[in-house]
Amino acid sequence: MNKKIKNIVLLIVGFVIVQFISELFYKRFDLTADKRYTLSETTKEILSTIDKTLFITVYLEGDFPSEFKRLQVETGQYLEELASKNSNIKITFEVPDNQREDLIKRGMMPSQLTVEEQGKLSEAIIFPWAEVAYGKKSTIVALLPNAIVASQEEQLQKAIENLEYSFSNAINSITQTRQKKVAIITGNGELQDIYQYSFLSEIAKKYRLAKFTLDSVATSPQQTLQDLTDLDVAIIAKPTEKFTAAEKFTLDQFIMNGGKTLWMIDNVNADQDSLFKTGKLLAYPRDLNLTDLLFTYGVRINTSLIKDLYAAQIPLATGKVGNQTQFKNLDWFYHPLVGANPNHPITKNVASVRLQYANQIDTLKNNIKKTPLLLSSALTQKVGTPTFIDLQSIAEEVIETNYNDGNQVFATLLEGDFNSAFKNRVHPFTSPLFKEQATANKMIIIADGDIGKNQILKGKPYDLARDKWTNQTFGNKDFLLNSVNYLLDDSGLINLRNKTLKIKTLDKQKTYKERIFWQFLNVVLPLLILFGFGFGFTYLRKRRYS
């Protein structure tokens, strides 16, 4: 008896010791083939900066389609991995039913899904959002991408792929103590603030915005350059007036001193308002005096307009029924709907981007790495300028053989060591900041000034991602936000958008057709086997002992 008690005591002591050691050396193992729960070094670095409680509230809870339970489970497992790395992270899942209006006011719009269950289609509404709060700051995280996808299964896969970037980006933005500075360049007829509100209001959530005019170059060029170099990135959105040599020198030296630039350039003047008022518009080249500057960096923006058979729509009056004017949405080939490069973190999982009267970009040979970001379809036609564009042409029969100019580049990323456009040239003014070369810099050039221009509805700015007339959705806002994030990303955070996973899903039609067989195999057959075993065992027992 004493020996038995001794063994039981030793067993209990051993169990306590093992439990204590396991708590000291806690370790999670990622056994998935694609290592979907293994955090990147970038994410670990971000998590290490959290020194007080960070709350993550997920609104994927409640009664919604079974296939999106997968997103709920994957989100929960990923967040558990974050919490295991830092105990300051607290996670909760909430049912959004009683707070829908409040969530919508805070920017969390619901998603309507078409669900196929037992061979029947039905509609369901979910709130695929999460909220991250840290101290007095908070931000929201979209759990479903806004990309154009072929199926909900593909949408689900892209959502799961994007989990690490979405949460790491949100946590990084609200835990940073120093916000980087974004300059909105003015002074050369750039877009007014109200037309950039949709894009810039999102930028302001993460970075410090500052309007910066180049008008002061004429009176105090040295100080203007000094002030500009204190900023991190400059956005030049659709300038319409010619740049002076001193202004170009200021921008050039901002770049040579490490400043990043996002150019949105219209090299052709084409007034859309004139088209709708008179039915015609005159498109003619616009001289911004930037050709030599961009040429030095390895890019030339042409003055030809591109027509693309894969285009966005515009509303046109087609007649009247009684006193009501009837409108119809028709493809307008001067508004290309361009595809995003699927292999770059800026553009991966970004929906098609709408351009308006865009020009194509030619790249020149130099030491700069050039990555195309936005490309047209292969069915394009170049239209030389000056030219008249007639709205009546929308009714003309399409002859595909006329659209044979192939894929055109509308946006490109430049990375490398940039040479100054004023190297070995006379300088408009002297400055102690002058440099002949920039080391490891980057810029993005877009050959369309309207890519970031939002519409106005009832005097207020409309969402850049949607057209107020046709209700089409576009990837313009996501593309521009990703572009700024990439230019300012020194930690490699945005590269997490290139994460690729393999999510295995069931064939719904096949499972519906074969459901009776699999129900029998999984439910009835085990019971039959158990019954047969019991009957056989009883029969043998009776035969043996009778």
Image (cartoon, helix red, strand yellow):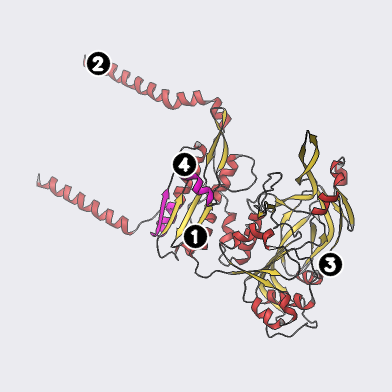
Q: Which residue is mark 1?
A: 171
Q: Is residue 543 above or below residue 410?
A: above
Task: Tell me whether circle 4 and circle 2 mark residues in contact (CB < 8 Å).
Answer: no
Q: Which residue is mark 4?
A: 97
Who comes first in sequence, dot 1 or dot 2? 1
The mark lying in front, picked from 4 and 3, is 4
User: Where does the image place residue 419, in percent across and percent down from the top left?
Assistant: 74, 75
Left or right: 328, with 153 as reference point: right
Left or right: 245, with 503 as reference point: right
User: Where does the image place residue 22, in percent across and percent down from the top left?
Assistant: 31, 55
* Residue type beneath disc 2: Lys
Q: Tag 2: Cα neighbours inside 10 Å, few (<14), some, or many (≥20)?
A: few
User: Where does the image place residue 543, in percent across and percent down from the top left?
Assistant: 26, 15
The quarter of the displayed image where residue 542 is located: top left
Q: Which residue is mark 2?
A: 542
* Residue type beneath disc 4: Asp
Task: Tell me whether circle 3 and circle 2 mark residues in contact (CB < 8 Å).
Answer: no
Which mark, residue 287? 3
